[in-house]
Amino acid sequence: MIIEEMTLTDFERIKENLQIDFDDFWNPSILKSELESKNSKYIIAKENDEILGFAGIIITPMDVEITNIVTKKSQRKKGIGKLLLGKLIEMAKQTNLETISLEVNEKNCIAINLYEKYDFKKIGVRKKYYNGVDNAIIMTKVLK
Ligand SMILES: CC(C)(COP(=O)(O)OP(=O)(O)OC[C@H]1O[C@@H](n2cnc3c(N)ncnc32)[C@H](O)[C@@H]1OP(=O)(O)O)[C@@H](O)C(=O)NCCC(=O)NCCS
């Protein structure tokens, strides 16, 4: 398994089946514009030339935000999420900013478990953030 920077060519390879293979809420055009943004950095996990997961951060003046982390549905529970998150944290540390943060649906226990494993702490809630229904939990981790 290798982790490397995600390119627009990688995006072209996965875009047709993005929602089926990876996650339902992902809109390909949002991902493409994030890949083109100079403030975003995306990585992929790849094995035998197959993209098994991807994840990204946006670097803001205040902190580093995780925009998403997703493993291919057929490849979950094999440690790929941990590999991607570990790499994002490593990249965030290189910015010299103090924190890395994210928003996660409070019902997404799997992702919350993953973030807690890496010492992210719940610091707030955005009420009815997802589709006007589900709350978002804001989590943060001190980098220094
Ligand atoms: C969250 C996600 C990225 C985890 O990816 P993964 O490759 O399956 O994760 P890993 O195999 O590295 O597991 C990492 C940890 O997540 C938690 N986890 C993973 N699957 C789990 C499950 N079915 N039930 C409970 N916890 C689970 C565990 O804490 C696990 O650590 P452990 O294996 O040491 O117990 C994946 O489920 C996914 O793509 N979900 C859809 C997208 C999403 O919700 N992203 C988060 C948006 S904020």
Image: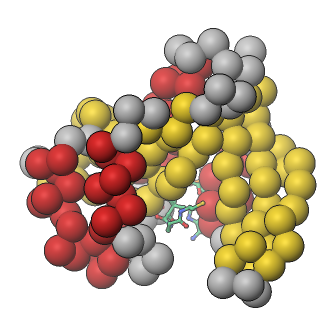
- Residue 125 in view (yes/no): yes
Task: Dividing the image into four quarters, tell me where ligand 1 lies.
Answer: bottom right
State the count of labels.
0
Q: Is residue 93 left or right of residue 83?
A: right
Residue shown at 56%/17% (left/top)?
95
Q: Quadrant of residue 52?
A: bottom left
Q: Is residue 92 left or right of residue 115?
A: left
Q: x and y percent of residue 94 in the render?
A: 53, 15
Residue shown at 63%/66% (left/top)?
110
Residue shown at 67%/19% (left/top)?
97
- Residue 73 in view (yes/no): no
Up the image or down, 87 lies above or below 77; here it is above
Q: Quadrant of residue 140?
A: top right
Up the image or down, 54 lies above or below 30; here it is above
Q: Quadrant of the N terminus?
A: top left
Q: What colouring method underlies this structural image? A: secondary structure
Residue shown at 85%/51% (left/top)?
122
Q: Quadrant of the C terminus?
A: top right
Q: x and y percent of residue 141 in the render?
A: 75, 34
42, 109: nearer the viewer: 42
Residue found at the very far right of the displayed protein: 124
